[in-house]
Image (cartoon, helix red, strand yellow):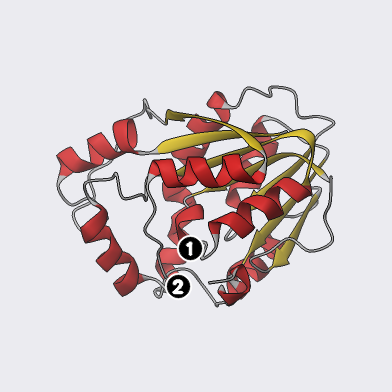
Amino acid sequence: MSEEAQKNIGTWYIDPDAEDRMADGHAPIWRHLFDLILERDLSDKSVLDFGCNQGGLLRHLYAIRPFRKGLGIDIAETSIAKAETLRGNLPIQHQVGGRLEGWSDEFDLALSHEVIYLVPDIDAHAANIRQALKPGGVYYAVTGCHTDNPLWPKWRELVANRTNTVVQDRSITDYGRAFEKAGFDVSARKLEYDGFIPFVADGWTPDFADALNYYTQTKIVFRLVKR
């Protein structure tokens, strides 16, 4: 399946209220991710957020580590429109789509959070991100949605029932091989989130023990350096 088969949608969640709440839920994870990023000074850097939804990650990053300019891209048209209204005067652009067009050797840093498991063609995605990065540019791709996740069979059903997207079945090794083949030096670590995790009775992990394991053991951060 080609990446062009990833059609634009309105929102990721079927429930628009859930879409609006997503950034608040992800914000502590984003801040933890920023602490893991080895590139500390971003003041003269250009940053890409692939799968940006309503643009919260880039706004949070700018507040903590200001960057020169940013681009957020997502297939969710309504969410991108919301991102534009929320960006204010920040040096951030937003674009609708599942593929970067017209951006070559442009970005120093790329980020994605729980997006790569939705990309139909991971090889095309890896090549596309590599093309958009400057030589030596780095892509941090975060996901716990992989077949090594013991919750994955349940989550496939939840994603189908709650969202407008289609998941892909890939292992951690599948991702590593795809990015290595595309021309990245591949390394990874567990997210090992060290904050308190709230109990959510009807969330993605209604078994609270599963939630604790997921954020400390299952979520993976890939660090991908363009060769």
Regarding mark 1 in the picture, which secondary structure is present there? helix
Q: Is residue 69 left or right of residue 196?
A: right
Asked whether residue 135 appears in the rendered view, the answer is: yes
Picture coordinates of residue 73, whole percent (x, y):
67, 60
Q: CA distance from mark 1 to mark 2?
A: 6 Å
When asked about the image quadrant of residue 44, the answer is top right
The amino acid sitting under disc 1 is Asp
Residue 16, numbered label: 2
Regarding mark 2 in the picture, which secondary structure is present there? helix
Q: Which residue occupies 24% across, 42% down? A: 211
Q: Is residue 63 above or below residue 2?
A: above
Quadrant in which the C terminus is drawn:
top right
Check contact, mark 1 vs mark 2: CB within 8 A. Answer: yes
Q: Is residue 32 above or below residue 17?
A: above
Residue 20, numbered label: 1
When asked about the image quadrant of residue 216, the answer is top left
Pointer 2: residues within 10 angstroms few (<14), some, or many (20+)?
some
